[in-house]
Image: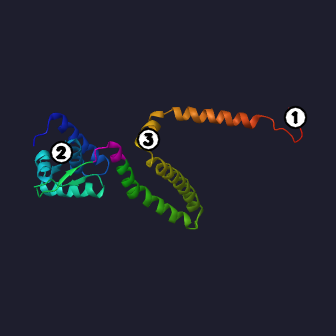
Amino acid sequence: MELSPTVQSFVLHFGEMGSRWGINRTVGQIYALLYLSKDPLCADQIVEGLGVSRSNVSMGIRELQGWNLVLLKHIPGDRRDFYSTPGDVWQILRTLAEERKKREVDPTLSVLREILMEKPSTESDAFAQTRMSDMHGLIERLTNWYDDVKSLETERLTMLLSMGSKVTRFLEAKDKIVSLGRSRPQKKEGQSD
């Protein structure tokens, strides 16, 4: 299996990026190769395409399966396991976000909750808890926002993302309308226009 220069460039880049995202370079390359492959690939094809060891491919596939990023496929008449990625890039993004939330955000929220339940013993601890409370509040707001957004249909999510700074202008307009309503004098009972 020989990779075209285009595919090879993407695979190599994805491997480099993978190491920056906290995954093994080979895992990133395996994922990139599977993502770009028209047909599901078996481990031997991945070994041949990437020029890495079979054990490295096996461990990489297991890691990707742990992240729910690869799909196991069976081809009639072939006893080998074949792998592919979801075809919808939005589904991949949702899976990555959910897995990162489970592995990174949820444990952080749990630790922060536990620490914040403790009574501070010093002024320094009280200051630290105030800072941690701020962090907890922000992460919890983002988590709640994520929970709302993750259930959006792809079309709605695309619309939301394409709104960009229009959301800010909308919120500014809402603020102006609300402030106008507050600045109008209130009528007293029995008073007419």
Viewer-proximal residue among 137 and 175? 175
Q: Position of residue 168 (x, y in %)?
A: 55, 34
How much space separates mark 2 and mark 3, taking CA atoms? 28 Å
| Residue at image coords 10%, 47% | 48
Is 124 situated above or below 171?
A: below
Q: Is residue 153 above or below residue 106?
A: above
Where is residue 91 drawn, in percent x and y?
Answer: 34, 47
What amino acid is at disc 3? Leu
Amino acid type at mark 2:
Asp
Q: Is residue 89 magenta?
A: yes
- Residue 65 occupies which quadrant of the picture? bottom left
**Which stretch appears magenta?**
86-93
Of circles 3 and 1, which is in front?
A: 1
The reply to whether the magenta stretch includes residue 56 is no
User: Disc 1 designates what residue?
Assistant: 192
Q: Where, quadrant-wise, is the C terminus in this rendering?
A: top right
In the rendered structure, the answer to whether residue 53 lies left or right of residue 16 reads left
Please give the name of the residue rendered at 70% of the width and 36% of the height, measured from the top-left corner: 179
What separation in Å lies between label 3 and label 1 (alpha carbons)?
A: 48 Å
